[in-house]
Amino acid sequence: MNQYLKLACVTLLASALAACSGVGSSMPNLSHQVGSSATVSHGVGDYSSVHVMRPFGSIQPALTGALTYHGGPVLKKPIVYVVFWGYNVSGADPNGAQTYLTNFLTGLGGTPWSRTNHQYYQIVNGHNQHIGNGTGQLVATWVDSTNAVPGSPSDAQIRAEAAALEAHVGFNQYASYVVATPHGHNSPGFGTGFCAYHGATSAGGHVISYTNLPYMTDSPNCGQNAVNPGAAGIDDGFSIVEGHEYSESETDPQLNAWWDSGNGEEIGDLCAWRGLGDITESTGSFAMQPLWSDLKSGCVLHTP
């Protein structure tokens, strides 16, 4: 049996107990404004301006309808940079995440999975500019051994490392800057409040889209063996979660572009942990979640 069926009741019970104890009441609102005053809370810890991917077992949002455009930019010609922060240290990567993520992102561009994003766009001078789906979207990776990784890096420290990555590889307005932290060095709330998140920050005089990508196998709630059993599925969570965050970075990089006006959910949120499966890339097979398609009015794993 898929471990996610086994974990569901346990996780939901823990969530219910936390709610009853008042733990959730101290969490800030972290997601989009919905209307003039209401907000949708994805809150964990001290993260005040990011959009999180909830762990498996969290209450899933209702599929309430289309994503709508709110005027902000998208990553029209998406590319991605990854810093493997502190991965040079012995024991930092016991499950081969660096190789897995590099292969995954190398082959992701041009796939039918990524093609779902093409229906979304930015409006510039009255023209719709749709998100592209070119190949070769992973431009560079960097193992940063110059800055010590904190035991539990705060969002401010993640943003500083994203800025260091931007300084190292250069600025591109269509880039996602991913900070992958090593085994045992995850931000507070990982695995209970979120699996990863994305947001926008200032770096080098520019606004960049950044992602906090913890070490997925450090939590049972973030995708390990979610699709594939045994050794083949140990790193499933890395592709499921980074795929989720990269797609949302493309469609909502500064948290002001595409989301569901009814509940503030983004393209990945509406389909998180639903209908998981493998996708085929030139670099291998990788576990993934579907994405919300306005064209299909539902979650799709592939767009022809």
Image (spheres, rainbow, N blue to C red):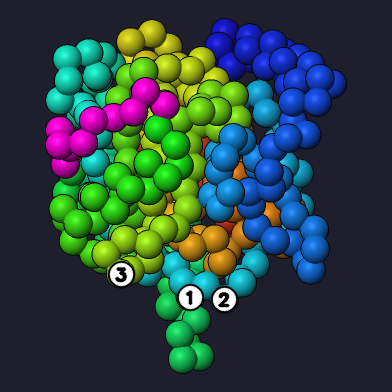
| First of labels 1, 2 by sequence position | 2
27 over 75 or under it: above or below: above
Q: Position of residue 133 (x, y in %)?
A: 33, 60
288 over 202 or under it: above or below: above
| First of labels 3, 1 by sequence position | 1
| First of labels 2, 3 by sequence position | 2
Query: Spatial distance from mark 3 to mark 1, Cα to Cα?
Result: 22 Å
Which mark is on residue 122? 1
Q: Is residue 66 left or right of residue 219?
A: right
The amino acid type found where label 3 is placed reads Gly
* Residue extending furthest toward the bottom: 125
Residue at 66 percent across and 23 percent down: it is 57
Residue receiving disc 2:
71
The amino acid type found where label 2 is placed reads Gly
Q: Position of residue 109 (x, y in %)?
A: 29, 52
* Closer to viewer: mark 3 or mark 1: 3
Q: Quadrant of the N terminus?
A: top right
Query: Few, some or many C-alpha atoms within 10 Å of disc 2 (few <14, some 14-19, many ≥20)?
Result: few
Quadrant in the rendering for residue 10? top right
Q: Are marks 3 and 1 in contact (CB under 8 Å)?
A: no
Q: Secondary structure of the magenta portion, mostly?
A: loop
Residue receiving disc 3:
205
Q: Quadrant of the C terminus?
A: bottom left
Q: Are marks 2 and 3 in contact (CB under 8 Å)?
A: no
Specify start and end residues of the magenta stretch as a single range: 142-152
Is 217 included in the stretch rendered in magenta? no
Residue at 61 percent across and 72 percent down: it is 70
